[in-house]
Image (cartoon, rainbow, N blue to C red):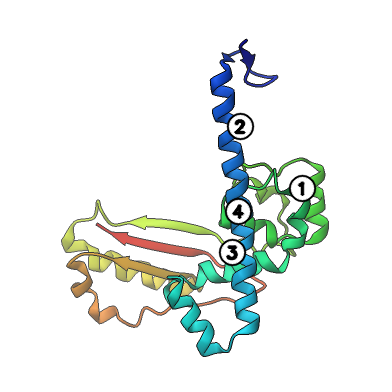
Amino acid sequence: MSKKLSSTASVVYSKQVEEFVIQYRICVQKTANAILELANVVKSAKDTLSDDDFKFFRQEIGANESKDSYIKKLICIAKVSSRFADLSDKLPPSYTTLYTLSQLSDDVFLKICSDNVISPRMTAAELSPYFNKKSNKVELQAMLSFKNVDDSEKSLAFSLIKQICDKFKIELKFNIHSSFNDAIKSLSDLNAVSMPADEATPTFEIEVA
């Protein structure tokens, strides 16, 4: 017997589709729970190991200094993991979204729960209406691609972007996989500029085709 996909959908689906939907949702739940477990392991290692041992731990799990943002987000998630205990079937399978949820104050988080905003399909962007000046610690991210920029102009474009990032204290990360890498050696002073922890930190990741 066929069933409706949801109360708001008129499309019917077979029993086989229902079984795949159930399997998928179970996998999503497992993924979200696995992220929480990873976060707790990383925080436990951070709290227990010496600095040198923790550095070695990071190397062994493939999360060296180039993945500072990833490690920091997992630790933030672990610090408030108890708030997710009763939501295992609703959590999104995204460490970035879970991190954003972890940055909310307790009262705002409770408001989100009462509004039934949290779901496996939610994104961090859906939480923007709940942020205010006091609780706005969400990390803004943007991806800039140079693939449509002429080779002759890439160095200039990169230099101008660096100037903007310096002016507004934007953290700049770049990953270059082309001969353009040689052209910017004069810009080797492109170190990340961090803002205070209580302020939002826009992050621009640049890829060069």
Image quarter where the N terminus lies is top right
| Label at residue 112 | 1
Marks 1/3 in contact by CB < 8 Å: the verdict is: no
Residue type indicated by callout 4: Thr
- Residue 3 can be seen in this image: yes
Q: In x, y percent, where is residue 75?
A: 62, 70
Describe the element under mark 3 as helix, strand or loop.
helix
| Label at residue 131 | none
Query: Label 3: which residue?
Result: 38
Q: In x, y percent, where is residue 37?
A: 63, 62
Q: Residue at x 75, y 65 (%)?
A: 134
Above or below residue 170? Residue 209 is: above
Q: Residue at x 61, y 65 (%)?
A: 39
Describe the element under mark 2 as helix, strand or loop.
helix
Describe the element under mark 1 as helix, strand or loop.
helix
Nearer to me, 70 or 191 = 70
Drawn side of residue 52 relative to residue 36, left or right: left
Image quarter where the C terminus lies is bottom left
How far apart marks 1 and 2 lie (CA) works out to 25 Å
Marks 3/4 in contact by CB < 8 Å: the verdict is: no
Residue type indicated by callout 3: Leu
- Mark 1 or mark 2, earlier in chain: 2
Marks 2/3 in contact by CB < 8 Å: the verdict is: no
- Mark 1 or mark 4, earlier in chain: 4
How far apart marks 2 and 3 lie (CA) works out to 24 Å
Query: Label 2: which residue?
Result: 22
User: How many neighbours does mark 2 have within 10 angstroms: few (below 14), some (14-19), or many (20 or more)?
Assistant: few
Query: Label 4: which residue?
Result: 97
Marks 1/2 in contact by CB < 8 Å: the verdict is: no
- Mark 2 or mark 3, earlier in chain: 2
Q: In x, y percent, where is residue 49?
A: 59, 85
